[in-house]
Image (tube, rainbow, N blue to C red):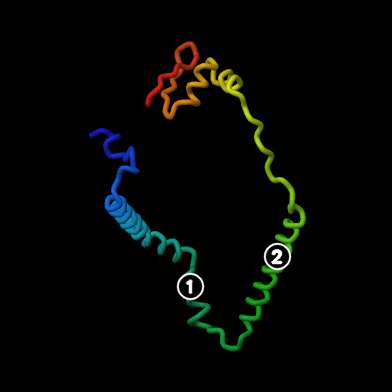
Amino acid sequence: MKAEAIVIQRPERQSAAQKAVFGLVTVTLWVAWAFLWLPLITLGAWAYGIRDALTQLHLVDPITDGGDIHVVLIVAFATAAIFTAWSGYNYARFVGKQKRRGNSPVGVAETAAKIGAHTDDAVRLQGTRRAVVSVADDGFMTLKESR
């Protein structure tokens, strides 16, 4: 069986039912693939001590007096203030400025010279939908049009 036979060359020719079936099969297989990785993810979580940290925080010494929650809130507000200040600084620095310069257009003659082709070949390349381009032994491009 050739590899081209299993690749969909023209997906616009598929019916809606075929697209739905292939989509369902794809989602099912991705879920199965993710399911196979769960034991390894669990092992990694245990290795990093996530289970022990959750046990220490919630089962051994639950937050009852509210002392720890104040520290968490202070850190959360400090982090929010730092990120807000940083984003405000970047906004003030970059607002209204052009981030990228546009590319200058390249002519057909320049393109042909760069790829080692004649201007006629470059014009034909622009006009075809698909083309097979190969390089000869002497280093020059040869063009075979395909429709």
Q: Residue at x 66, y 31 (%)?
A: 104
Residue 85 appears at what percent x and percent y? 73, 64
Q: Which mark is residue 52?
A: 1
Residue 23 appears at what percent x and percent y? 33, 53
Q: Nearer the viewer, residue 81 or 66?
A: 81
Q: Are there few (<14), some (14-19), or many (20+) residues within 10 Å of tag 2? A: few
Q: Which residue is mark 2?
A: 84
- Mark 2–mark 1 Cα distance, whole angstroms, equals 33 Å
- Badge 1 amino acid: Asp
Q: Secondary structure at mark 2?
A: helix
| Residue closest to the far bottom | 65
Q: Residue at x 31, y 42 (%)?
A: 13
User: Mark 2 or 1 closer to N-term?
Assistant: 1
Q: Residue at x 59, y 19 (%)?
A: 109
Q: Quadrant of the C terminus?
A: top left
Q: Are there few (<14), some (14-19), or many (20+) residues within 10 Å of tag 1? A: few
Residue 56 appears at what percent x and percent y? 51, 77
Q: Which mark is residue 19?
A: none
Q: Residue at x 74, y 51 (%)?
A: 96
Mark 2 or mark 1, which is nearer to you? Answer: 2
Q: Residue 7, relative to residue 92: is it above or below? A: above
Total number of numbered discs in the rendering: 2
CB under 8 Å between discs 2 and 1: no
- Badge 2 amino acid: Thr
Residue 44 appears at what percent x and percent y? 44, 61
The image quarter containing residue 9 is top left
| Residue closest to the far top | 138
Q: Is residue 13 left or right of residue 66?
A: left
Q: Quadrant of the N terminus?
A: top left
Q: Secondary structure at mark 1?
A: helix
Q: Is residue 66 left or right of residue 55?
A: right
Q: Nearer the viewer, residue 17 or 66?
A: 17
